[in-house]
Amino acid sequence: MKKYRNDSRNCKKQLRKSDETGIGWYKKLELDEKLQYYRKRRKIVPSRKMIKTPEQIEGIRRAGKVNTEILDEVDKIMKAGVSTEDINRLVHEATAKRGGIPAPLGFEGYPKSVCTSVNDVICHGIPSKEQILKDGDIINVDVTTIVDGYYADASRMYCIGRVPEEADRLVRVAKECLDLSLSEVKPESCLGDIGAVIYAHARSNGFSVVEDICGHGVGVDFHEKPYVCHVGKRNTGMMMFPGMIFTIEPMINAGRMDWFVDEKDGWTIYTDDGSLSAQWEYTILVTEDGYEILTR
C-alpha cells in the first residue's frame, strides 16, 4: 500500500509537470509501451535519446528559424559574378549577427562556415575567392547553425542566370524528391518509406540517387542517429515516432550515383562521371500527426 501511495503521488507530480511542458505524462507512457511492443516484434525502433524532449524541440526550432533566415539572406546575392567566398562571408556575418555559430567552421578541420557545391560537386564544396559563379552554373548552399547549443541544418539549390534545360530539370526533380518524401514522415511509418519514394521519383525521371551519403539526426549535435538513406524499401528500416528530428537531403545525380573525394582538400565530393548533381535539405520534426519543417 505504501508503494502504491508513493506511485500515486509520483503520477500526480508527473502529470502536473507534463502540463508545464505541453506533453502529457500518459503520452510518454504510451510511447514507451509502443516502443516496447514493436521492439518485441523485432522492429527497429529509436532509442529514447533519439526522441527529443519538449525543451530540446523548442531550442532546435529556434535554431531552425535562424538557419532559414540565413538562407534567405543568401537568396539575395545569388547571381553571376559572386564568388563562393562571398557566400561564405555573408553566412558567417549573418550567423554572428543573429547570435549563432556556423557549425561547419572547424568541424573535423573544415575551414569555412558553409558548404558551396557547384555543378558536379555533390556536397562539401569549400568556398573560395577564386571560384566565381557564372551564367549556367547550379550550386547548392548548405547552412548549419548553432543557437544556444542547438543545431539546425538545411540547404538550397540555385540556378545562376540561364541554365541548360537538363540542369534546370535536375534541380526541379531533386526538390520534388524531397517534397514527395515528406508524405511518408508520420508516426509508426518506417525510414525506408522515405528512401523508396525518393528513389522511385528520381529513377522515373532518368536520374540516380547517391546511396551512401545520408540524412541524419540533428539538433543536440551536428550529426546524430538515425541515418536516413535516400534509397529504401517500404516497411523497412527504423520506425518513426513523435519527437524524432532528422534531415532529409537527397543528392540526385544526372549520371551515375558513384562519387569520389578530392584528395587535395579531403572534403569535396564529386560525381565520378563528371555529371551534374543537385540537393535540397530540410530539418524535419516527426509530430503526432505528421511532420513539421524546422528549417528549409
Image (tube, rainbow, N blue to C red):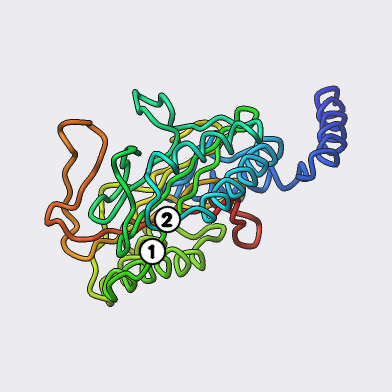
Image quadrant in which the C terminus is located:
bottom right
Q: Secondary structure at mark 2?
A: helix
Comparing 175 with 200, the one in front is 175
Residue 94 percent coordinates (x, y): 58, 38
Comparing 196 with 260, the one in front is 260
Question: At x 19% / y 57%, what residue is drawn?
Answer: 257
Question: At x 29% / y 47%, what residue is drawn?
Answer: 213
**Can residue 231 be seen from the camera position used here?**
no
Q: Is residue 135 above or below residue 27?
A: below
Locate residue 150: give its quadrant: top right
Image disc number at residue 159? 1
Residue 65 percent coordinates (x, y): 65, 46
**Can residue 141 be seen from the camera position used here?**
yes
Locate residue 85: give its quadrant: top left
Question: At x 29% / y 76%, what residue is drawn?
Answer: 165
Q: Is residue 127 above or below residue 276?
A: above
Q: Which residue is mark 2?
A: 191
Q: Secondary structure at mark 1?
A: strand
Q: Is residue 182 above or below residue 142?
A: below
> Looking at the picture, which amino acid does disc 2 mark?
Leu
Residue 200 percent coordinates (x, y): 31, 71
Comparing 190 with 223, the one in front is 223
Image quadrant in which the N terminus is located:
top right
Question: At x 55% / y 61%, what residue is drawn?
Answer: 186
> Looking at the picture, which amino acid does disc 1 mark?
Cys
- Relative placement, left or right, of 278 versus 141 is left
Compare marks 1 and 2 and give the one earlier in the sequence.
Answer: 1
